[in-house]
């Protein structure tokens, strides 16, 4: 038997098991797993002794080439997926935006053409729905059939993305029938808008007021309301970018009642805090994203939520804007700072470092949070999210001991700063394979724009 590639002697870690084995790859798929597989006929062999072999990371929340806040996010599908694979993430789920009055199809077609011939790794889309008044509910069924099986709705950004509760409820009733999953941006946008207008009237215009005008209670209230609407509709719900303990408590209570409620958090809420706004001058603009940074004590609550399965996924909400050219738009008024931060490249290392290397949870839980549960919830499992015969050979040979100091000087994202500048992580990807092809070998990029495929996803599978 001749394999295309064999990865020898690595410590294979999935969400459930850790064992030493060889992994054999043919035509982009894993075809054999076991001790001492016959390597002599393999076209290529990679020695992974002493290294972890992990399923490629899945980041279910990125915004590449996204028009927002009067500009467009700085990474496109080429630079963003390239940075992702450097960090050990081999699948992205991005967002196709339906603007008011548009068909959902228009959103899907637009984002398909943004990604075509650019993506370095596989990708899929959620559809952002901002208007359900003209046949879009029926169109949600069409998209589910075409593999776009999740929909982001907003309870924030009034006048731009926000939907009223009745529209949200109708969308949830639709997914309760078609098997889709609603991803909710949960913040009380109407109340926040009042607080923002009052702050501006008092001359409070510096970046830190972005955070000070979006209280944790506004996130907790919307999280509870989203869960109640989903319960009434008989639908599952997934809360995106959860940032604080107040919202986490709402998710935990719902899950304790046995409801199909899930939530993600992001590395910025685990590593950064409102203290980052003490940075001099306008530097605080680097940390303007939504929901905002919270007081430091929330961080440990979120780590604990990840350990105890009150939170199920870590995504990045990667939405980069350059400090010089783009964040500048809000120099005199924080409401004009484009909301978003860069993160797609460092999720795996930050979560491995803070989670596994620092002893908070096991490598198996790390895999579950960064790959397996994202694959299960978003209809990609078992093609993605695990190491098993028949699965895609999206694999990361990961050095659990290698240290790296994160810096904009060395990162691959197309943005002029890092939110995590100077943070030292333990654990870095050495070699990354996307469907059997080596795309990264330490600091060498060996991939090609356009080799990533669009993934038609199945509908949501309930996890624990
Ligand atoms: O500030 C953020 N998070 N920008 C991206 C849009 C969103 O709400 O996810
Ligand atoms: Zn959001
Ligand atoms: Zn987002």
Image: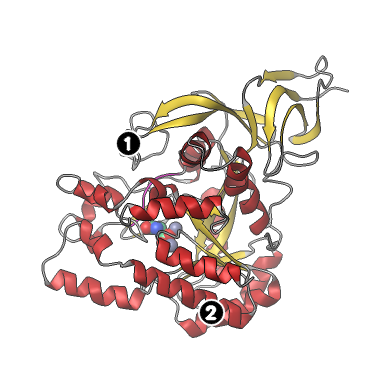
Q: Residue at x 71, y 66 (%)?
A: 145
Direction from residue 322 to residue 168 in the image, left or right? right
The residues bearing labels 1 and 2 have C-alpha atoms spaced at a distance of: 39 Å
Direction bottom: furthest residue: 166
Q: Residue at x 71, y 59 (%)?
A: 458
Q: Return the x and y of residue 141 as percentages of the image width and height.
A: 67, 73
Q: Secondary structure at mark 2?
A: helix
Q: Return the x and y of residue 459 as percentages of the image width and height.
A: 70, 63
Task: Please report whichever mark, 1 or 2, sits nearer to the chain's N-terminal start.
Answer: 2
Image vertical order of residue 321 relative to residue 338, above or below: above
Direction right: furthest residue: 1
Which is nearer the eye, 121 or 318?
318
Which is nearer the eye, 350 or 77?
350
Which is nearer the eye, 103 or 143?
143
Image vertical order of residue 422 relative to residue 343, above or below: above
Residue 421 has which mark?
A: 1
Which is nearer the eye, 311 or 387?
311
Range drawn in magenta: 339-343
Residue 235 visible in this rendered orientation of the protein = yes
Residue 91 visible in this rendered orientation of the protein = no
Query: Magenta part mainly helix, strand or loop?
Result: loop
Q: Residue at x 68, y 57 (%)?
A: 379
Question: In this figure, which residue is indicated by the disc labeled 2?
Answer: 228
């Amino acid at each position: 038997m001749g394999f295309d590639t064999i990865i020898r002697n690595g410590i294979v870690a999935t969400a459930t098991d850790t064992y030493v084995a060889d992994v054999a790859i043919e035509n982009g798929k894993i075809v054999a797993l076991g001790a001492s597989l016959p390597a002599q006929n393999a076209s290529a062999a990679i020695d992974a002794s002493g290294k972890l072999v992990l399923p490629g990371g899945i980041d279910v929340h990125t915004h590449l080439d996204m028009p927002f806040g009067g500009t467009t996010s700085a990474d496109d599908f080429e630079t963003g997926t390239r940075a992702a694979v450097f960090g050990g993430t081999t699948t992205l789920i991005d967002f196709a935006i339906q603007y008011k009055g548009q068909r959902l199809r228009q959103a899907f077609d637009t984002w398909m053409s943004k990604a075509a011939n650019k993506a370095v790794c596989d990708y899929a889309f959620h559809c952002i729905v901002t208007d359900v008044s003209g046949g879009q509910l029926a169109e949600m069924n069409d998209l589910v059939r075409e593999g776009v099986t999740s929909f982001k709705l907003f309870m924030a950004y009034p006048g731009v993305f926000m939907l009223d509760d009745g529209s949200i409820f109708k969308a949830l009733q639709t997914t309760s029938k078609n098997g889709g999953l609603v991803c909710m941006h949960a913040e009380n946008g109407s109340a926040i808008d009042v607080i923002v207008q009052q702050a501006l009237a008092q001359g409070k215009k510096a970046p830190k007021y972005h955070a000070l005008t979006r209280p944790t209670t506004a996130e907790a209230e919307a999280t509870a309301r989203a869960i109640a609407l989903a319960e009434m509709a008989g639908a599952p719900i997934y809360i995106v970018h959860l940032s604080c303990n107040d919202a986490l408590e709402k998710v935990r209570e719902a899950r304790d009642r046995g409801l199909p409620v899930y939530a993600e958090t992001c590395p910025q809420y685990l590593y950064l805090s409102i203290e980052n706004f003490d940075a001099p001058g306008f530097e605080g603009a680097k940390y303007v994203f939504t929901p905002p940074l919270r007081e430091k004590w929330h961080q440990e609550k979120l780590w604990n939520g990840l350990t105890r399965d009150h939170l199920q996924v870590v995504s990045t909400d990667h939405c980069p804007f350059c400090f010089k050219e783009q964040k500048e738009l809000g120099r005199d008024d924080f409401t004009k700072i484009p909301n978003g931060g860069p993160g797609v490249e460092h999720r795996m290392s930050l979560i491995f470092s803070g989670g596994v290397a620092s002893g908070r949870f096991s490598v198996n839980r790390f895999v579950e949070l960064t790959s397996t549960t994202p694959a299960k919830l978003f209809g990609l499992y078992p093609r993605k999210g695990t190491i098993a015969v028949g699965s895609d050979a999206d694999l990361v040979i990961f050095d659990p001991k290698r240290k790296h100091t994160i810096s904009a000087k060395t990162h691959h994202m197309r943005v002029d700063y890092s939110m995590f500048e100077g943070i030292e992580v333990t654990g870095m990807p050495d070699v990354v394979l996307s469907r059997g092809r080596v795309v990264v070998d330490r600091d060498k990029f060996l991939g090609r724009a356009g080799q990533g495929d669009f993934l038609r996803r199945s509908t949501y599978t309930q996890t624990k």
